[in-house]
């Protein structure tokens, strides 16, 4: 595994690989890697000749009151995990490599997909994500790039960016990886205290109940959301940000759950904001 820290060196590597006819699989991450990230790396390893993983905690996707400074970082542990995955390159830039002149120009996602759901509570977040991913795509020139379904709204924004900017990149969305009790893996789970960790599983329980109701023939969003709310209310430190049923492509709210509906939750468990979702096919 080569470690590359500069944009020039990374571009040179990717261009050479491309010219030699190698397919490039790219997994962008913010580090503190868990099995969810590794499932993306494994999918890339299976499908591409060259696998590039980036670790960059992107400042432009954090609001001024968010956890940029305390976002978990452990590069040595991440390197060890990636060494076991037989990747080709770890791209590890500093912020001034990615934003040498600041960030005066951004990729701006349409409000209909960037200011709903998580975007309502995190204004500018998805523009920051789209901007950094566009920059990372420019440097790594991937054929395929891998994202987790846990960040469902992020995948919709990135898919639209690739489509609308005509980027020749296939976006591969991989299933959510869960702990044994169902909690979706996330770097932010490490913020949870013991009691919060025990309550956090309620997000999965609420989604599982929704799935059960839908399998039983229920399609009323209002009723499903009400039931989910009552399950989340059992956690004394849980404060719901949103429970939504949306069309999986447009992210528009739906009154009736049908095929291609995301059921999505964001909730604070203590001070930690967690998200989770299921896709109804
Ligand atoms: O999902 C993430 O970890 C980040 O949003 C990403 C895609 C690496 C961009 O910073």
Image (tube, rainbow, N blue to C red):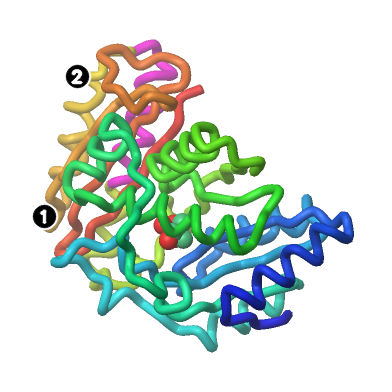
In this image, 278 relative to 169: left or right? left
Question: In the image, is the residue at mark 1 within 8 Å of ligand 1 by its beta carbon?
Answer: no
Q: Secondary structure at mark 1?
A: loop
Q: Residue at x 29, y 17 (%)?
A: 254
**Residue 175: quadrant of the picture:** top right
Disc 1 packing (10 Å; few <14; some 14–19; many ≥20): few
Depth check, front residue: 251 or 261: 251
Q: Is residue 77 above or below residue 139?
A: below
Please provide percent x and percent y for residue 207.
34, 36
The answer to whether residue 185 is seen in the rendering is no
Ligand 1 closer than 8 Å to the CB at disc 2?
A: no
| Foreground disc of the pair 1, 2 | 2
Q: Is residue 75 above or below residue 65?
A: below
Magenta includes 256? no
Q: Which residue is mark 1?
A: 236
Between 7 and 55, which is closer to the camera in this rendering?
A: 7
The residue pinned by badge 2 equals 222
> Residue drawn 54% across and 78% down?
92
Q: Tell me the crowding category of disc 2: few under 14, some 14 to 19, or many 20 or more residues within 10 angstroms, Cα based.
A: some
Query: Which mark is drawn over residue 163?
Result: none
Majority SS type along the magenta span? helix
Instruction: Say left or right for 270 vs 15.
Output: left
Q: Quadrant of ligand 1?
A: bottom left
Mark 1 near mark 2, Cβ–Cβ under 8 Å? Answer: no
Q: Position of residue 179 (x, y in %)?
A: 47, 58
Using the rendered image of the protein, determine whether residue 71 is visible from the camera's viewpoint: yes
Does 41 sit left or right of 175 as displayed?
A: right
Determine whether 269 is above or below 86 in the image: above
Q: Which residues are magenta?
A: 203-218
* Residue 263 x, y percent position in the rendering: 34, 31
**Residue at 16% over, 51% down:** 235
């Amino acid at each position: 595994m080569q470690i590359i820290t500069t944009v020039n060196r990374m571009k040179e590597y990717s261009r050479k690989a491309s010219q030699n006819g190698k397919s490039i699989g790219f997994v962008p991450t913010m580090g503190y890697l868990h099995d969810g990230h590794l499932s993306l790396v494994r999918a890339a390893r299976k499908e591409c000749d060259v696998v590039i993983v980036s670790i960059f905690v992107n400042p432009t996707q954090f609001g001024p009151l968010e956890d940029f400074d305390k976002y978990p970082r452990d590069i040595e542990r991440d390197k060890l995990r990636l060494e076991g995955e037989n990747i080709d390159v770890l791209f590890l830039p500093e912020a001034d490599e990615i934003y040498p002149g600041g960030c005066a120009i951004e990729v701006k996602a349409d409000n209909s997909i960037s200011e709903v759901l998580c975007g309502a509570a995190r204004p500018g977040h998805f523009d920051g994500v789209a901007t950094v991913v566009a920059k990372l795509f420019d440097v790594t020139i991937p054929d395929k790039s891998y994202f987790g379904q846990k960040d469902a709204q992020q995948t919709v924004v990135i898919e639209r960016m690739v489509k609308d900017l005509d980027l020749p990149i296939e976006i591969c969305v991989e299933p959510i990886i869960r702990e044994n009790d169902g909690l979706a893996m996330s770097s932010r789970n490490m913020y949870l205290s013991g009691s919060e960790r025990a309550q956090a599983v309620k997000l999965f329980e609420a989604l599982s109940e929704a799935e059960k109701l839908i399998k039983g023939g229920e399609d009323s969003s209002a009723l499903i959301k009400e039931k989910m709310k009552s399950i989340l209310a059992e956690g004394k430190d849980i404060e719901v940000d949103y429970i939504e049923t949306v069309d999986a492509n447009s992210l528009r709210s739906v009154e009736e759950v049908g095929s291609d509906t995301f059921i999505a939750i964001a909730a604070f468990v203590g001070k930690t904001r967690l998200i989770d979702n299921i896709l109804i096919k």
